[in-house]
Each structure stands twice: as structure tokens, then as C-alpha cells.
Image (spheres, helix red, strand yellow):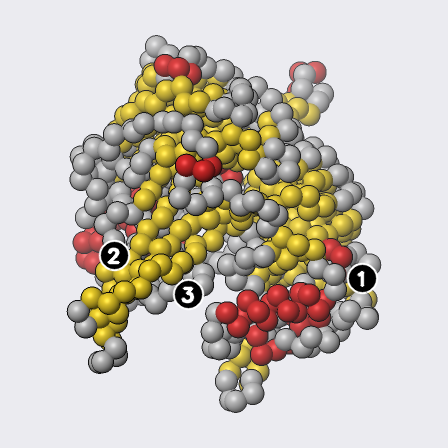
Amino acid sequence: MNKGFSRYLDRLTADADLPAEEEVAHVLDRIRAKEDLAGEDVSPPPQKPQTSRKWWKPVGLIAACALVAVGVFALLPAGDKSGPAVSSGPLVYAAEDYGDVYKAITAAAESKGSDYGYYAVEDSGMMLEDANGAAAPTADAPAAAEEDMEMPTSDEAANATGYGDAPTGTEGPGGMGGETEYSDTNTQVAGVDEADIVKTDGEYIYLLRNGHLIIASAKGAESEILSNTELTEGGEDTYEYYSEMFLSGDTLAVVCDRYEWSPYVLDGGYWGSADKDTVYVYFYDVSDPTAPALSGKVGQDGGYTDSRMVDGVIYLVSTYGVYNYYGYVEEQPESYVPCVYGAEDSSLIAPEDISICEEMEDTRYLVVSVISTTDQDVLDTKTVLGGGDIVYMTADSLYVADTVYESNTGSSYTSDQYTVTEYTEESNTNLLKFELTDSSVALTASKKLNGYLESQFSMDEYDGYLRLVLTIENWGYKVYRDEKYGWENYEWQDDDNVSNALYVLDGALEPVGRLEDLAKDEYIRSARFDGDICYFVTFRQTDPLFAADLSDPTSPQILSALKIPGFSEYLHFYTEDRLFGLGMDADIDTGGTRGLKLTMFNVADPQNVTEKHTLLLEDYYSEGLYNHKAILISAAKDLIAFPVSGGYSVYGYDDDRGFYEKGRFDTGDWYGDTRGLFIDNDIYICGYDTIIIVDMDTLGVIGKLSFDAGNDEPVLYYEDVEVEDLIDYAE
């Protein structure tokens, strides 16, 4: 959902002139569900095709009106498709010098038309100063390091190693001579931490809120706020957004997006803006939680994409766009090459560290850096001109996928007074593989795949193979042109081809096995891998949960396909033979969504997966639908918890009772970004400006901490929208 629109919806409940809060809340839930699941994925009218263009994938949740059969599943060789499912050669090539980079960027810009690039985005070459306020680095003269910035003062946990438990850590000795048990961020891969807005070491809770770092002691009913540090703000024409953080020992690494802009006039009188995105990692010493102190920072050009951490080493990924076509100067690589800002100096990324995609969606760099939280410095950086935004990482490999939408010109013929040209479009994935050490990153393989990935959970590496599930979408249209009168008309074809596929790739990203033509006319909504088994959900009117056997990488097989109403947006192994799904209920005839649902699947026999229990909720929205880090799950603690609009819900589960509500806690939080965690026998619910402490046995509130989260009046981006219009839209 558009973030500005979301903030406007959140603000509505505080307006005294609006309908009752309960009614508005119901409307907002309906809108959020509709926006996230169907609203923004609307097919645009056909446009005159270009070589490559963005196109929002349609989901067709409401328009479909017939029950779709699961279809026939067969193992098909690549030659059985009309086009190759996997490209035959590498996707990228190494740049020999900056001249290669310049040629690739200008060629890509020219292919998009003469007006491409009137407005620069993240163009460091047009900036007079770099992000540190020093002279911008050039190829011959790296910038000097920034002086320490004045700041107000005020264990890495392992991922889940078994089924059902949230990622947990221990810190001991704790009270009564034992160890403290605590949950950590819900992550995808064991031992690979993911940044989030809340972290804990079992003794303290660290929370990012609106540019504030809040640190609280975690002592149950005796907990207290120890410090509330307002993080630095940029100066004039600079905006900083502190998004996520890692905790490694006594070091808190906070990820910050910094955006700067400076207007100028282009040749010919066009207005431009030398805009610049830089992502920084700020290191704070939190050994004294009452007075966190800035101890260092590093950064790289581009907007923050994602990150991971293994054993105190951060792997930071950013996307750096260079769109100021008229500002490029071949002899000045600083005008089109990203910079890295180390602890001691700043420099352009060297040509030998740059790779170039043969086919680019647009002129974006993917920048990957290795950062030590111990040395508080950048150890290595590689970049690929071509972009990417879906990140999956193991302890040894980093995969980055970029979805591209391509248009191809077909036959042309005459019909009556029209010249008719046929076009086809398809979604593809550019996939990059990096090998990692604790001090280096190297691009080792690349491949182009047919189809697009739903999320990071659509990828999994196991026994040296990468397994992926993708939705393949091909569609066509015709352009009717009247040459005499010079006008055009467009006609969409009715035979759009939507299906799904499972690929198995070796270490060089070469295909060794595949399943194709799965679940025709449906879209993948979620996936989870468990060793040799892959579970994935597709949806149009019903929710087929597929189980695929990958024990033979060269011959994957579908074992079963369970069809139930609705779909699961997130899958999580609760125990060894129980798979939990958080998703939406849906009308079996129309596919229209009706509210949240919890499902527990019995996966003891992958050839006969069954629905053990399902609970339909009155809520229509949860951040957990699209952000796994908002979900807290622990079978050992009998916990399944997640935020809902205005509150936080805690459920339990057993095979006899099914799901049962243990408690619902009003956070008064319509801003999102609510997190829950447990430390020993207490649950801490971290809302926008409160931390609610709950006894896990009684589910009674034993404490509540309040803090100033800064600006508590959200900007109204849609002030002209009336409540009645929102109600009509929701219905």
C-alpha cells in the first residue's frame, strides 16, 4: 500500500468529526486488506510497447468467477516451452574500465527515449559535496574521512535451530542462578540475522521509533525506560530515516537512509535536481544503556534495500540509480559511479569491482558491502549495474533477484484500414549469486529466469542447490493503427498465460531440474522449504498448498496439493510435522477476501497434507501478512502472536483445541511497526510510544512503559479524501 495513503488512514481514527472508532477501524481494515492484496496490482491500459517497461502484475482476486482446477503436474524439459525458461549464458559481464560503465549507462538511457533523465536521481557527480559534507570523491582523489559527529547521549541471537521456536538466545547467569531465555527477530535462515526495529539481548530492549533510539531494561513489572536518544537529523535539504538495526554485543548498528537534493538548471532551460541517496550504518556503543554513544559510521551510495548479519559481520545491500543522462561526463566517473564511505576515507567503487547486466530494467546499481561491527569499517564492496531488490542469504551465499518486465514485437499485418501489430509481454527474473566470507564478497554466477519471485521465501539453498518457486506470466495485446488518420487503438488478448514453476539450480546457477505449468491461472502467495520438501501456496479462488519432493534435484515431483478456501500469505514450521499459515479467508466462488485466518497444516506425510485446524478472525489486516519480522512464534512457549489494527493478538495452539485466543492488547497503535518478544516468562509488546509487559502465565498486564516517539502527528498526504469515499472504496 502507498505509505502516504496508509498514514492518512491511520490518522482518521483520531479525528473527532469522523464516525465511531469501531466503524472506522472496520473500514480501514477492509481497505488495507484490499490495497495490499488487490488494490495496487491493477493492469494499466496498453501503452505503446518499449524495449522494456514496468508493468504491475495483476492478481485478479475479485474478478475471477470460476473454481480453477489444480491442473496436471508434469516434469517438462526446457524444450517443451515456447521459449527458454532459463537463459543459456551468464547474465552479466565484468567492466574493464569506467569507459565500459559509461557506455552501458548511456546506451540504456538512450534506449528509453530522449526525454529520459531530465530529473536526476542519486547523481553524485552533480553534488558539490559528498554525504559527509566533504568534497565529493573523484577517481583520482578519494575524500577524507568525516570527523566524529556530535550526538546526544542517552548477543547477536541465533536463529531458530528447531521447529516452532522463535529465534532465541540465552544470557546468563540470570535470576535464581539460571539463564535468561529470550526471543529474537523472526528470520528465514538459521544463524543469519535480519535487521529490525526492535532488538533485545535478554537484559535490555532496543527500539527505533521515528528517529529516536529507546532503550529499556527488561525486568518484568520493574522494567523502566533508561534512555531516549534523538538521533541526528540532516541539515537543510537533507532528510534522514533510521529504518532498522542489528545488535552485536555492546554495539548497536543502525541503518539510516540519507536523502539530499540540490536543484539546478540543465542546458536548454530544463530544471533538474542533483538528488542523492546514501545509506549509512551508524555504530552506537550501548555498554552504558543510559547513555548510548556514537562510535563510528560507514556508508555507501544508494537507497537501503536489505541487509543480513552473520557473526558480527553485516552484509549491506543498496540500490543506486543514475538517471541524470545529461549530467554524465565520461572523463568524470564520479558523475555515474557510486561511492563507498569508509571509516577513514571515501572512494569511488573501482572498475574491477563493477559488473554490468547484459539486459537492464533501468540504470540502477546494486551495491553490496561487507561491514565489520568490530572494526566498524567497510571490508569489501562489489556492485552490479542492473539492480535487484529481493534478497536471500545463507551463511556463505547471497542471492539478489530483480524482476524485469519485457515487451516483444510480434507479427504485423493489415486488416481493413488498420495496420495491426501484435505484442507479447512477460515477467522475468535476473538472478545474481555472491559468495561470502567474513571479509569479502564476490559475484560468482548470474542467470535469467522466466517468471518472478513472490518474496525472499521463494528461494532456498540446500546441499549446494538453489531451489526457487516462481510465477510465470505472459500476456499479449494488439495495436490497431489507422495510418490515414494517425490514431491507434488497443486490444488485450484473452489468452493470458499464467502458471507457476519450481526450478533447481546448481552452484553455477545452471538448471538441473524443474517443474512447470503448475496451478494454471493462479499466483504464488507464499512458500517455505524444509530440507528435501518445498511447500508453496497458489491462489485465485482457493488455496492449493503444494508439497514437492526435491530429494532428487534432477527430478522434483509434486507429492500433494491440498485445496481450501482463502490462502496463506506466510508459512512457518510450528513443529516438525505442523506447518502454520497466516493469511486471508476468501469466497470460494469469487476469490474476494473476507478477513484474516490462521491455519495449521498436518505435514507429517507430505503425500497427504491435511488441514488440521483453521480459525477465522474478525480482523482484516496484520503487518504480519507482508512482514515476517512482525510475527512472534514459539511452540515451546505456546505462542503465536502478531499485530492487528490498533492492537496485538496472542494465540495458543494444540492439536486437540486448535487455535485459541490467549489475549488481545490495545496498543492504540495505528502507525504499524508493532513488535512482540518474550524474555523468560514475560511478553513485551513494543508499540509506537508504549511497551506493554504481559505475564505469560496469566496473560495479565503487569507493566506499561511510555516514551516520547517524536513527531506523533503524521503528515496528511490525502487531506481531500472524505470518509464516505473511503467507506465506498472499502465496500
**Which residue in the structure is indicated by mark 1?**
345
| Residue 107, quarter of picture | bottom right
**Which residue in the structure is indicated by mark 2?**
492
**Which residue in the structure is indicated by mark 3?**
50
> With respect to residue 266, does 666 lie above or below?
above
- Residue at the outermost bottom position: 268
Q: What secondary structure is found at the residue carrying circle 3? A: loop
- Distance from disc 3 to disc 1, alpha carbons, whole Å, reads 42 Å
Q: Quick one: 694 or 592, which is closer to the camera?
A: 592
| 2 or 1: tag closer to the N-terminus | 1
Res 177 label: none
Q: Which mark lies nearer to you, 3 or 1?
A: 3
Q: What secondary structure is found at the residue carrying circle 1? A: strand
User: Which residue is located at x 19 percent, y 57 percent?
Assistant: 724
Q: Quick one: 521 or 118, which is closer to the camera?
A: 521
User: Which residue is located at x 71 percent, y 21 percent?
Assistant: 173
User: Which residue is located at x 19 percent, y 48 percent?
Assistant: 731
